[in-house]
Image (cartoon, rainbow, N blue to C red):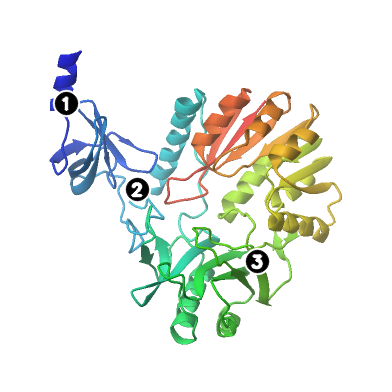
Amino acid sequence: MKQEKKQRSQNLLNKNDVVELVIDNLGINGEGIAHVDGLTVFVKGALVGERVRAKVILAKPTFVVCRLEQILTVSPHRVAPICPVYGKCGGCSLQHLSYPEQLAYKQKMVRETLKKVGGIDVDVLPTVPSDTPIGYRNKVSLPIRSVRGETKIGFFQPSSHFITPIDACPLQKPEINRVIALMREFLGFYGGAPYDEATGKGDVRHLVVRSVGGKTYVTVVLNQKTDLRPLQKLLENALDRYALYVNYNHENNNVILGKRTEFLAGDCEPIDLGGYLADIHPAGFFQVNDYIRDKIYDTVCEKIGRGKVIDAYSGAGLMTARVAKNCREVYGIEINSDAHASAVELKNFNSIDNMHPLLGDSADVLPKIADENCAVILDPPRAGCDQKVINALKALSCPIIYVSCNPATLARDLKLLDKRVVSVQPYDMFPQTTSVETVAILE
């Protein structure tokens, strides 16, 4: 055993070593993976089948991280990234991989994660593609900062507060990119000092934009009160339908939105979302890909049953409303008061008598209303379901549809629920990234 350890230590790669590698897999963050003398080697930007030259930047006893120096043999699936700041802003990680291969990668990732984390060996269906791999996002949140006297609007680089400035993002809808340009014009010519994290001074902290149902919702997050009337005028001249909100966040933290949001100007009428009148609050959760959202909702409505349904993490209530069309009663549980208010508005706008929005934590509410005769929709945040929710559902034999944005917590929760997995279907809610939405149907 000692000799084996000694031999292993002699084979370790060291920092600044330059090595040639053949990539045999992609990791959960889209990085290329190679194996050398029992070591797992990660190379960001490399693709399966490529022979690359890479430099060691981090060496550990069981794994090594390398920086890609040169591609010696190029994968046939490699494509040119469409974004000028790809690799810098941290938003995308798969733009260099062809779209069909992105879909295959996500199917494989879901299958392997279910098996590795949850011990669930199940066939995973092919990933449902987005209608477009670019220009699909209906929401963006951008920090606005003063850096050495210069105004920067962009994305925080991974694990940092360094901003990569952008003029536009190719993943966003055109209306959103238009608002980014208008905000830059407002800050440059009309006032509103960008926020300075070092001093805590400045006016404007974040820009949050959502474009859905033909209307663009613009929320400016302020550190202190400032005159937004010039921005209002710019929006009036550039957009057909818009709503301008102001949110106040005076805290020294990483949270984007503060607790107080006010409507300032624009169109306050509801929008049409697939035949349902709705209004989306700036703080409410809403899926970022309209096409995939509707695909998932169609599947849930088809599979969930016709009796009593509980939508355990219901957000603004759109899926709850759509399910109500085909079931006897549906209860939507939501902990965020603004999202809950949107769900109540949606119910009233559309006169949906069998839809019952409930404000509260699913961990507390669901065990009180779930029974053997109900069906349950789970669409939790990335952290997955609360243990109280899991415990309540384990005691029941009701069917469950689990909609997940995190394969790892999906696998964990499916293992804990200990029910038969009927089907698993990935959906490409987030093209050009490693993120994937998954729908699992349980009996």
Residue 355's spot in the image, x, y percent? Answer: 81, 48
For the point 46% across and 80% down, which residue is it? 187
Where is the C terminus found, in terms of image quarters?
A: top right
- Secondary structure of the residue carrying tag 3 is strand
Q: Which SS class for mark 2?
A: loop
Disc number for residue 260: 3
Q: Amino acid at mark 3?
A: Arg
Q: Is residue 330 above or below residue 350?
A: above
Three-letter amino acid code at the position of disc 2: Leu
Q: Quadrant of residue 32?
A: top left
Q: Check the picture and name the quadrant holding the N terminus.
A: top left
N-terminal of the two: label 1 or label 2? Answer: 1
Left or right of residue 224: residue 106: left
Q: Does residue 164 lie above or below 100 as drawn? A: below
Helix or strand or loop: what does disc 1 sit on? helix
Q: CA distance from mark 1 to mark 2?
A: 35 Å
Which residue position holds label 2?
97
Residue to which mark 1 is pinned? 9
Residue 27 is labelled as: none
